[in-house]
Structures are given as structure tokens and as C-alpha cells.
Amino acid sequence: MQVTYPRSDQPNRRRVVERIGEYKIGKTIGKGNFAVVRLAKHSISNTKVAVKIVNRSRLDGESVLKIDREIRILKTLTHPHIIKLYEVIRTDQYIFIVTEYAGHGEVFEMLMEKGRVSEAEARRLFHQTTAAVAYCHSHCIVHRDLKAENLLLDAHNDVKLIDFGFSNFQQPQSLLSTWCGSPPYAAPELLLGKEYDGMKADVWSLGVILYVLVTGGFPFPSHSLDKLKRAVLAGQLKIPYWVSVECSDLIRKMLTFHPGKRYSVENVIQHRWFVAEQSTKMQQLIRESMNSGLYPDTPSSPRLNPTVMLFMQQHTKWTEERVIDEVKKKNFESSVFATYELLCDKVREALDEAADVCAQPRRGSRGSIVSGKVNVDIQPSTPTISAHHLAKLSLSTNADGDSDKSDTSDADDASSPGCSWAQRHAVQLSTVVGGEQMPAFGNRAEVRRHTLCAADPTLPLDTLLLAQQIPAGSPLAAAAAAHAAAAAALVAHSAANPFANTAIPTNLLALNHLPVYTCNRILPLPSCMLCHLLHLP
């Protein structure tokens, strides 16, 4: 792997990495004991990433194991609220760990700048954090350093859990003994130096995080480790009055001194404060996070993104066979796999943004004093019939009897027999509702998809309306005309002789062709469709 350093006239000046592989290294955004985190940009995808640069010369044996374990764990985790690993680059002097970049800073910095957040916002952030921790626990991974400083916010103000340096694998019914983490977030069993359940210790840290979010302070404030121990052992937990009863109850159950009585992650996600105002998407994410370890991904050939594959073939030097091979192996130490993942994430983000734009309701013309417009609905809602309902009735939305085809254009609709029938008779397809004529299809773009609710006003059966839609010259037309004339004669005769008992004759020619209607509503249909329904030539 090629590493580029900036040119300098001073030979003794400490060299700073300027470029590594496909990444152009930028400013420093974080520092640690033996590593520095710098902002970088991927040259092919033009995506910002965070590069953790570890100096091998400053590592001892234990630190090397810690770095390797962090890398191994990050390779295992794939969660929307856990920082994503893209690539690992190893040289003789450095180890470069490339992850996604969350540019809105730490949750701790946000609290220091703005103070505590509302319970609604705290619940949103806590949902995401708990989902990430539940995902780790389902894979038998404990974080052991949960704190507000290790929660980053991305461009959408969503949580990204980072820093898995103290993480470890823990099997069920086993205990850990290594003391690690930050004292203000450490569970009592860690402060006492006892063996502990890492998952219950993570729940304690989650309780401290929730307390910090809703209060802006720590549950056990102290200036020394000894005072912190005494406060924790004494159970001096005070929750401010502005915190709701439900939230206070959850905090107390997470900050229970005895780990056996302390809430687990399963208990947390079922608490009434946690489930309140929880979106369907978050419910699904939490459910998947809890069960992901029970159903591990089976090794199979991944479905490659054709858009990304085409782009990589056109803009990179790698062959299609190599890209497929590196992606199948999930080779995190290959720039090919990293490029593919970065491009996939970029395409996915663009699609999500487009979906969000389409999902936003369009603002109508509501009127205002400035515009002088009146709040009038330009297009009133009208009762319509859906295509699948027509299919159940052996009907269709075109004369050929085809099923619903929403891809047809307006030009196709204009040339359909139904429209030509309407043009010949100069009649707009309509329904009569409450004595008023309303267009059945208010929007031509929706002529193929209609809905008629059962709650709509019923339409009376109109014999004359039916007769108008029967082709002239057919036996059925003659029968309908005779039937209408007989009905009119009966009305006139009944008016003249109110006590006479007369009935409409039923032996008219071709009257048996008339269908028997048991419904109390009718919609006008084109003549060609009516002939098809009544089996007329």
C-alpha cells in the first residue's frame, strides 16, 4: 500500500501522512493515547470517512491485542446505529482503520453546548442507542465503555456507537474480570473490583446515559473515584422533578445496585416509557437487533448492485471478476471491497433521500391574504371504482377486458372505445349522488384506478339510464323501450284509476335478456362493455 507524505525542506520535521491508498487525508478530528483520528475523502466515491491512524511504535503487547480485537468486532457488526468499518490498511509503521464519518459531533458535546434535551428527543436517541447495544448483546459482544462521548451524531442527527476498544466477547452464564470503562458510567460491581456480567454492566451505563440526556448532569456527581464509590454504594440517586414518572422508573430500574435485580436489555425495550411514541420502523429495528444473533447470516452469494458494478467497471482499473471475488469474501483489507461498500452506501442514501422527498405531502393552494386566493378545493373527491374490484365482478377498465395497466398513457386512453363512445354521445361518465351529477373519474391520470367506498350514497336503479346505454337496433333496445313505455302507461293508468289493480306486462319480446339486478346502485358503462356483459353480438 502506497503512503504519501508532504514534501518538506526540514528533514527532522515529523512526517504527517497526506494520502493512503484511495484516501486523501485531511484535518485531525480526534486524538488518543496511541492513535489519532483524521478526516479523509475517498477519491472514487468522493465520500468523507474517518481514518484512525495507529502508530505501531507506541503499542505494547496488550494494546496490539486490543486493536486487533476492535477490528475483529467491527467486522462482525452491521447495524445502522453502529459506526461502519470500511477498510483496514496495514503498513510497517501504521495501522489505518477506515470507518464512516459522523460529522455532527458527540452527544456529550451537544449536551455541553445546549444542555439537557426534551424527553421526546431523549427517547429517540435512547431508542437508537439501545438498539445498537441490543444488537451487540445478541452477538455475545459487550461494549464496556458506553458513554455520551462514544455516541456520535451523523448528518441526520442519528446515533452512531463508536470506540469498541474495550469490547469483548462474552458467552452466556460467564463473567468478566477486566476493569475498564469510564468511572462515571461504571457499574458498582466494576467499582468494587468484582467479577461482573458485561451485559448488566452495559445496562447500568445505558441508565447513566439516559439520566444525562434528560437532566444534563450525572446521577452520582463527584470529583474523585472514592467519593463516586461512596455515592454509588449509598444509593444516593436523585432525579429532578421535571423528569416524568415513567422515565424516572426506568432510570431507577437500570441503576439498581444489585446486578441480579437490575434490568436487562430485554426488560428495557419492554418498559412503558421506552415503547411510548415508538415508530413502526424503530420497533422493527429493535426486534431485528434482538434476534439477529439467533439467526446468523448464512454464507451465500451476495446480490451485487448492478449500478455500482457498472460504475466501477467504467471508472476503476479493477475487473468485474476481482470485484465479485472481493465482495463475496468481504475482504476488509482490500480497497476494492471498501470502494464497493462506499458506493453502495452513496446510492442507498440517494434513494432514501428521493423516497423522503416523494413521501412529503405536496402543499396545495390554501389561499392567503397576500395572494388573495380563497381556500377552495380545486379537485373535489369523487367516488370511483378500483380495478381489482371490477375484476372480481368480471369487469375491466377497458373494452378489451384487460387487467389493470397503470403504465398506459393518456394517448392510449383517448383512443379507447370507452372514450370514443363518450365523445359520440357527448356525455361525460358520471354518477348521480344526492341529486347532483358528479364526474366518476375526476382525474384522467387516475382513469385506470378507482375506488368506491361502501359508505358512499347509494345510486337508484334508473331504467331510462340503462336504456340509454343499450345499442340502438338490438332486440334488447326494443324490449327496454317497450318496457319503459309500458311502465309509463301504467303510471298514467294508475293516476286515472287509483283503485285499479294493474301490473306491468312481462311477456315483452326479448325481455328475458334483461339482467336481474339485486343491487341498489348503478354506474354508467360504455355500450361496448355493456354488450360484452350481456353477451350481445
Image (tube, helix red, strand yellow):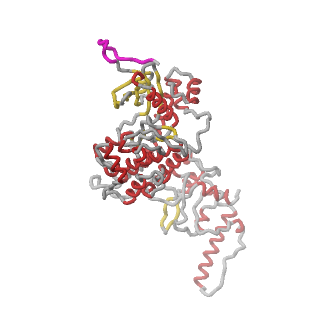
Q: Nearer the viewer, residue 9 or 140?
A: 140
* Residue 411 visible within the image: no
Seen in the image, is 383 located left or right of residue 17? right
* Residue drawn where x is 49% and y is 48% of the image: 286
* Residue drawn where x is 57% and y is 62% of the image: 523
* Residue 315 visible within the image: yes
* Residue drawn where x is 37% and y is 40% of the image: 182
Q: Position of residue 214 (x, y in %)?
A: 34, 51
Quarter assignment of residue 6: top left
Above or below, 208 against 47 in this view is below
Q: Position of residue 353 (x, y in %)?
A: 43, 41
Q: Nearer the viewer, residue 219 or 105?
A: 219
Magenta stretch: includes residue 289: no
Q: Nearer the viewer, residue 13 or 194?
A: 194
What span is in magenta? 2-14
Q: Position of residue 501 (x, y in %)?
A: 65, 84
Quarter assignment of residue 274: bottom left
Above or below, 278 against 171 in this view is below
Q: Position of residue 536 (x, y in %)?
A: 70, 58
